[in-house]
Amino acid sequence: MNLYIADNNDKYYKIIQMEKEYKDGRHFPINEIVESDIKIDLKAKDYKKIGGFFISDYKNIFRWIVRGDTLCEVIIPSDTCIYRVEGNVKAFVSNKIILVNPLKLNDDNVTVLYNNSNLPENEYFRALAACSIKGYIKTATRLIKEKINRQNIDVALTEFIEFCERRNIEFGIDTLQINSVKLVLDMLNKRKIRN
């Protein structure tokens, strides 16, 4: 895994949980410096072991909507480095962040994030699974209409199901049994039959 120094002056965003606290009971404070418990390991081979806080830019944050219920802008303190993580989607890590301007996510503002996104094709399929898990059906329906066609429907279905199954393993939740996930999966299967 390669990390590259990024620009502290660029705009960054993070999706956080505000309604439900994290497993360890903590919440991210707003308008305060937050320091990661796990320092960034520039030599880590697995993204789960990199440490720091993962953040993204506006064109890529749509991919991360499954991570929470609130979108925050991120300020990088002046004494802190930010690193770009090598990968399909622009992601960055920093040991310290300040979260500001929290925005509660709903189907309308998630659609705005989708409209402004610029992701590789397979990341849209993963984001589709995230939309369905979070219940953003309007956004999911639009994404299906605009991004899924006869050439990519099989890949879209595979990515969708694998994303849901990974969530099952990581969090012990059978995401394929969530009503909104069933609805979107049904839309995908109908689209496959029509194509």
Image (cartoon, helix red, strand yellow):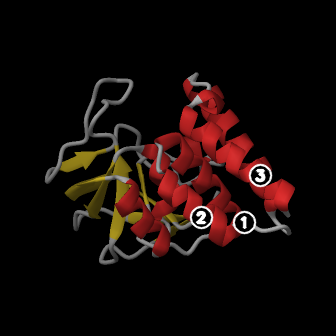
Helix, strand or loop at label 1? It is loop
Decide if residue 34 is on the left or right side of residue 106.
left
Helix, strand or loop at label 3? It is helix
Can see residue 173? yes
| Distance in Å between CA atoms under marks 3 and 2 | 15 Å
Between disc 3 and disc 2, the foreground one is: 3
| Residue labelled with disc 3 | 190
| Distance in Å between CA atoms under marks 3 and 1 | 12 Å
Q: Position of residue 82 (x, y in %)?
A: 39, 64
The three-letter code of the residue at mark 3 reads Lys
At x 85%, y 69%, the residue is 151
| Residue labelled with disc 1 | 148
Looking at this view, is 115 or 163 the one in front?
Answer: 115
Q: Earlier in the sequence, mark 3 or mark 1?
A: 1
Q: Earlier in the sequence, mark 2 or mark 1?
A: 2
Q: Position of residue 131 (x, y in %)?
A: 52, 50
- Among all residues in the image, which is located at the extreme left? 31
Quarter of the image containing the C terminus?
Answer: bottom right
Looking at this view, is 143 or 38 the one in front?
Answer: 143
Asked which quadrant contains residue 144, the reply is bottom right
Q: Are marks 2 and 1 in contact (CB under 8 Å)?
A: yes
Quarter of the image containing the N terminus?
Answer: bottom right
| Distance in Å between CA atoms under marks 2 and 1 | 7 Å
| Residue labelled with disc 2 | 143
At x 40%, y 55%, the residue is 107
The three-letter code of the residue at mark 2 reads Leu
The three-letter code of the residue at mark 1 reads Ile
